[in-house]
Amino acid sequence: MSRVNTVLGPIPTEELGFVAVHEHIGYGMPGSELDSVWWRTPEERYAATVPKLRRFHENGGGTFVDVTGICNGRDVDHYRSLSAKTGVHIVACTGFVGGDTALPHFARAGVEYLTEQFVHEITVGIGDTGSLAGVIKVGVSRGGRMTELDKRIYRAAARAALRTGVPILTHLAIDAENAIAIFNEEGLPLHRVLFGHVDDGVNAEKTRDLWIAEQGGRVGFDTFGYETELPDPPFWARPRKERLDHFLRFIDKHLDAALASADANCSPLGWPGVEGHTVNYLFDDLIPDLRDAGVAEATITTIFVDNPAGFLTITKD
Ligand SMILES: [Zn+2]
């Protein structure tokens, strides 16, 4: 049976439904839980998060992939209760957003140690929660090039993906040549990797999204909704139409490699977040925009149901 690990246990792939593939229940930098200005009580976090997940479910959302990673506020017990109360499947990840958010304990670790850590979280559990990670997060540190630590984490992720069959999802798709070289050296098929954030306002110009797809990688247009039209846009915002046109050009050529998401925080940790942006952007804005542009319903199903199912299904080639 094909299956995917969720925080409440493995489920058959067919039960995933509509998937938001790159999201956050709450993301913060390491140590933000000690921030006395921004830290929220459990009650505040539930109050901010539950209505968003309920509406996601009412809109037809089936699965929410939380790609928060180790050291960035990942809280699997919280996810378990949210999933049980709202009926939304939540997939948690192992791995790191980038080398620059790994705390020193992990930053000093070798490839073997990191591999064992990822494999443990996928096959035994995350901490003492008993929940298995369903994806591996890796990323490029701030600065635009992969650091030596980033490369160590990518290599460990590739080995863990090969051993467990769980896929890899990246924060940033810049410097993809170095990433793909590591995956090729380790023998990991590139359809097991989703190169994320190809559409963000900072990196879209220098990301080689078509080239990544030609190599066999999957491509994530996953910062939909971070628009310059927002009242207080973040620095990675981009004009709505420019992003949409970029996506339409991509799916015209490589629909089977395309995934989309909103990278929103239900309840950000240690920072104010971006007002007015939630996972429900996918239903409220993106899908209507796609329909207005003449995109067929079958294509929308490919992007949000079929492609994530193929990506998330535990696969040993
Ligand atoms: Zn993210």
Image (spheres, helix red, strand yellow):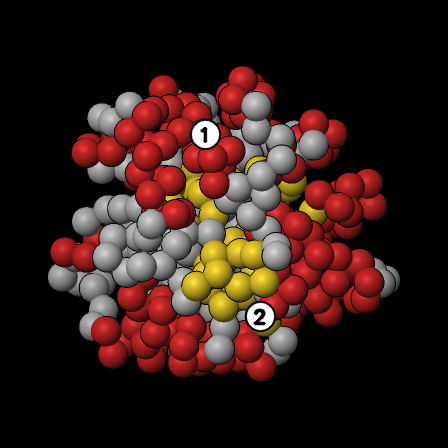
270 left or right of 151?
left
Assign a secondary structure to mark 2.
strand
Identify the amino acid type marked 1: Arg
Q: Earlier in the sequence, mark 1 or mark 2?
A: 2
Identify the amino acid type marked 2: Gly
23 left or right of 39?
right
Residue 70, horizontal then vertical, whole percent:
31, 46
Q: For the residue carrying disc 1, how many other residues have a C-alpha within 10 Å: few (<14), some (14-19), or many (20+)?
A: many
**How much space separates mark 1 and mark 2, taking CA atoms?**
29 Å
* Residue identifier under label 1: 159
Q: Which mark is residue 4?
A: none
Q: Residue at (28%, 23%) from the top-left corner?
A: 110
Q: Quadrant of the C terminus?
A: top right
Residue 230, horizontal then vertical, whole percent:
52, 62
Tell whether label 2 touches label 1 (CB within 8 Å): no
* Residue identifier under label 2: 62
Which is more toward the observer, 177 or 168?
Answer: 168
- Mark nearest the camera among 1 and 2 is 1
Residue 265, horizontal then vertical, whole percent:
42, 62
Give the answer, above or below, for where 102 lies relative to 288.
above
Give the answer, above or below, for where 57 lies relative to 296.
below
Q: Is residue 42 visible?
A: yes
Residue 316, horizontal then vertical, whole percent:
58, 39
Residue 183: which quarter of the image?
Answer: top right
Assign a secondary structure to mark 1.
helix
Q: Quadrant of the N terminus?
A: bottom right
